[in-house]
Image (tube, grey):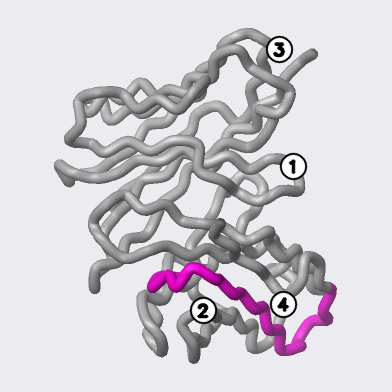
Amino acid sequence: AQTVTQSQPEMSVQEAETVTLSCTYDTSESDYYLFWYKQPPSRQMILVIRQEAYKQQNATENRFSVNFQKAAKSFSLKISDSQLGDAAMYFCAYRRYSGAGSYQLTFGKGTKLSVIP
Amino acid sequence: DVKVTQSSRYLVKRTGEKVFLECVQDMDHENMFWYRQDPGLGLRLIYFSYDVKMKEKGDIPEGYSVSREKKERFSLILESASTNQTSMYLCASSQNGEAGYEQYFGPGTRLTVT
């Protein structure tokens, strides 16, 4: 069974600084997708970034980038130039096949990020 | 823009009541999902559906059932609500297929069972 572990329940970062959120996962598959989702306080969960496992290059989306280490099964999220609006719960997720062409996500327990002005 | 809506943001029910949570998506997605979110536990999948009238159990289906009579609508049913079902419930939808399609989430329903 696939598991996703986020070892940092809470983190904080100074505005304009860089922070890295950790995520490890367990799988026996060779090709899969990984995601980082953001859930701001009292707002909807949205996708931050995704990574396909067979792609060597780390995904980037503006100030957000990942460090994907396939052999180590590690998928960390780096937020550069942190802004107050980055304060949120961040969830790492692994996508697994569930049959009939559909896929489901297994989520980690989340990391609550605070941004200090 | 994909829109996933849930019928209520907040709901208070009594123990033993039958509870319906409704979710509607407007992007013709094949897949729909119900999660519950609890502090320190993350999101856990209750049920999902990959087609009309099709349903599959997730990781924590006990005490819940679902209904999908139309493609855009996915309902979560608590047959006899209990206090341990007090939680935030999130609905999501996604396209079918191998490409890394994301799941789009609704705003959530915070259910309190007293």
Rounded to the nearest angstrom, the CA distance separating label 1 from label 3 is 18 Å
- Residue B65 visible: yes
Name the quadrant of the C terminus of chain A.
top right
Is residue B27 a member of the stretch shown in magenta?
yes
- Residue B114 visible: no
Mark 1 vs mark 4: same chain? no
Amino acid bearing label 1: Pro
Rounded to the nearest angstrom, the CA distance separating label 1 from label 2 is 27 Å
Q: Which label is found at residue A41?
A: 1
Amino acid bearing label 4: Ser
Residue of label 4: B82
Q: Which label is found at residue B72?
A: 2
Chain for disc number 2: B
Q: Is residue B46 left or right of residue B6?
A: left
Which numbered mark, 2 or 3, is in the foreground of this view? 2
Rounded to the nearest angstrom, the CA distance separating label 2 from label 4 is 28 Å
Mark 2 vs mark 3: same chain? no
The residue drawn where x is 65% and y is 32% is: A112
Residue of label 3: A15
The residue drawn where x is 49% and y is 74% is: B61
Chain for disc number 3: A
Q: Secondary structure at mark 4?
A: loop
10 Å neighbourhood of mark 1: few (<14), some, or many (≥20)?
few
Which numbered mark, 4 or 3, is in the foreground of this view? 3
- Dot 1 and dot 3 residues touching (CB under 8 Å): no
| Image position of A62 with respect to A14: above or below | below
Rounded to the nearest angstrom, the CA distance separating label 2 from label 3 is 41 Å
Is residue B70 a member of the stretch shown in magenta?
no
Amino acid bearing label 2: Glu
Rounded to the nearest angstrom, the CA distance separating label 1 from label 4 is 26 Å
What range is drawn magenta here? B12-33
Which numbered mark, 1 or 4, is in the foreground of this view? 1
